[in-house]
Amino acid sequence: MAQVCEICGKRPQFGNNVSHAHNVTRRRWNVNLRPVHAKVKGGSKRMRVCTSCLRSGKVTKA
């Protein structure tokens, strides 16, 4: 399943692991997602939301 926030669309970021000998390998930083029952249009819906959206109040829990 894709690591995408359903509110803000935040996705994983990509970069490099760099060792002391400067060996470079690809890596990714995943989004901190939480499954939440949120209020949407009067009902509740199960969504995968990043913690920054939860803390900022963009989502109201059902």
Image (cartoon, rainbow, N blue to C red):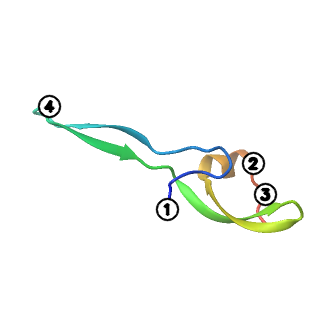
Question: Callout 2: helix, strand or loop?
Answer: loop
Tag 2–tag 3 contact (CB < 8 Å)? yes
For the residues carrying marks 2 and 4, which lies nearer the camera in this image? Answer: 4
The x, y position of residue 20, in whole percent, is 13, 34
Q: Is residue 56 left or right of residue 19?
A: right
Q: Looking at the image, is 34 positioned above or below residue 14?
A: below
* Nearer-N-terminus badge (4/1): 1
Alpha carbon of mark 2 to alpha carbon of mark 1: how far? Answer: 25 Å
Q: Is residue 62 left or right of residue 23?
A: right
- Tell me the residue that label 2 is attached to: 57
- Tell me the residue that label 1 is attached to: 1
Question: Callout 1: helix, strand or loop?
Answer: loop
Q: Is residue 61 left or right of residue 55?
A: right
The x, y position of residue 30, in whole percent, is 44, 49
Give the residue furthest to the front.
1
Alpha carbon of mark 4 to alpha carbon of mark 1: how far? Answer: 33 Å
For label 2, the crowd category at 10 Å Cα-Cα, with few meaning under 14, some 14 to 19 and many 20 or more, is few
The x, y position of residue 58, in whole percent, is 75, 47
- Tell me the residue that label 3 is attached to: 60
Report the quarter where the C terminus lies: bottom right
Tag 1–tag 3 contact (CB < 8 Å)? no
Three-letter residue code for mark 1: Met
Q: Image point 50% across, 49% down: which residue?
A: 31
Q: Looking at the image, is 15 positioned above or below residue 62?
A: above
Alpha carbon of mark 1 to alpha carbon of mark 3: how far? Answer: 23 Å
Three-letter residue code for mark 4: His
Three-letter residue code for mark 2: Gly
For the residues carrying marks 4 and 1, which lies nearer the camera in this image? Answer: 1
- Tell me the residue that label 4 is attached to: 22
For label 3, the crowd category at 10 Å Cα-Cα, with few meaning under 14, some 14 to 19 and many 20 or more, is few
* Nearer-N-terminus badge (2/1): 1
For the residues carrying marks 1 and 3, which lies nearer the camera in this image? Answer: 1
